[in-house]
Amino acid sequence: MLFPSKVKMVEVGPRDGLQNEEKIIDTKIKIEFINRLSATGLSVIEATSFVSPKWIPQLADHEEVYKKITKKTNVAYPVLVPNLKGFENALACGVKEIAVFTTPSETFSQRNTNMTAAESMRIIADILQAANANQIHVRGYISCVLGCPYEGDISTQAVADMAETLVRLGCYEISLGDTIGVGTPGKTDRLLKTVMEKIPREKIAVHFHDTYGQALTNIYVALSNGIHVIDSAVAGLGGCPYAKGASGNVASEDVLYMLNGLGIETGVDLNELISVGRFIAKQVGKPVQSKVSNAK
Ligand code: HMG
Ligand code: MG
């Protein structure tokens, strides 16, 4: 058991959460949401997505959101970028950090980005070259790492190879996405051990959706492997628009409650996080998907 003493929580609610909510949230509310998250002690808040508004109308206001949020110096505000057009728009808005995304599943790649996996890797290589030239930090996501809605099982070796390539191209961290929340603890453990043969554990983050209620257990397995970066969304917002049945991200409140109980430091205040989760759930018009928030 290699439990870390400190964990970096990456809040993805404003991006992964709101991208999949039916109700399009007013730009002013998104800005207030992110500003309130900035006051909880979080050090990373994925703010929005510079993707095509035709594909994700929920985040069509990405430029205004990014420009108008209050940026704290000790908080990173990465944005998701699918292509060079998104990168250039993000750069023009003053973005300092981006996240790119790909997957070993050919079908998911087509449905999510209208590209083959190989095309997406070529585009990511171009983005990384441009990002390196502009001192922009890049995080890499790999989706469907524990199963795909179209192709079923995904080879752990293919995920590990992709992680290695993304690190070689310049990603500082690889977030392993259980996009549809089908992972179980044994599978999670095997995946992490395979990926750790290719990249150092310090560069691995985990990103669980909670469709089958396994996310916290899987995170515990990741912690026991020494992983110290965890993605989550307040109020358990979100899902994935191109993955039918994918439920929200694991709730940040529940992750934090578990980390507090394990004595793992995060710098994040639970009561503040609960309060922001309730605020955004009310705006979205859905109940808070956090057991901890609902029990308090
Ligand atoms: P396409 O339709 O093949 O591209 O989409 P296109 O080049 O033909 O462009 C179509 C239109 O979009 C054009 O506009 C472009 O200008 C515009 P028109 O000429 O028709 O008026 N466009 C853009 N506009 C703004 N920003 C851009 C941009 N690019 C093109 N960056 C494309 C290809 C990649 C753009 C599209 O498929 C796309 O945006 N996909 C994003 C889908 C997405 O965001 N999915 C969810 C994120 S991934 C995820 O959630 C998983 C994750 O959470 C981890 C996990 O859980 O596993 C990260
Ligand atoms: Mg996701």
Image (cartoon, grey):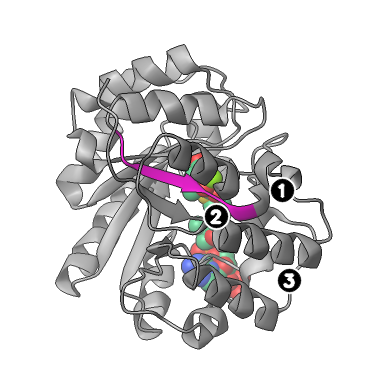
**Which residue in the structure is indicated by mark 2?**
270
Q: Is residue 155 visible?
A: no
In terms of image quadrants, where is residue 64? bottom right
Does 82 appear above or below 158? below
Distance from label 1 to label 2 (Cα)? Answer: 11 Å
Residue at 27% x, 36% y is 4
In terms of image quadrants, where is residue 55? bottom right
Q: Are marks 1 and 2 in contact (CB under 8 Å)?
A: no
Residue at 19% x, 33% y is 199
Q: In screen coordinates, is 84 left or right of 294?
A: left
What's the amino acid at mark 3?
Ile
Q: Are marks 1 and 3 in contact (CB under 8 Å)?
A: no
Residue at 32% x, 67% y is 97
User: Which numbered disc flags the more N-terminal residue, 3 or 2?
Assistant: 3
Residue at 81% x, 51% y is 287
| Ligand 1 within 8 angstroms of badge 3 C-beta | no
**Which residue in the structure is indicated by mark 1?**
296
Q: Which residues are magenta?
A: 227-234
Does 214 appear above or below 66? above
Q: In screen coordinates, is 296 left or right of 17?
A: right
Task: Say if the magenta span includes residue 217.
Answer: no
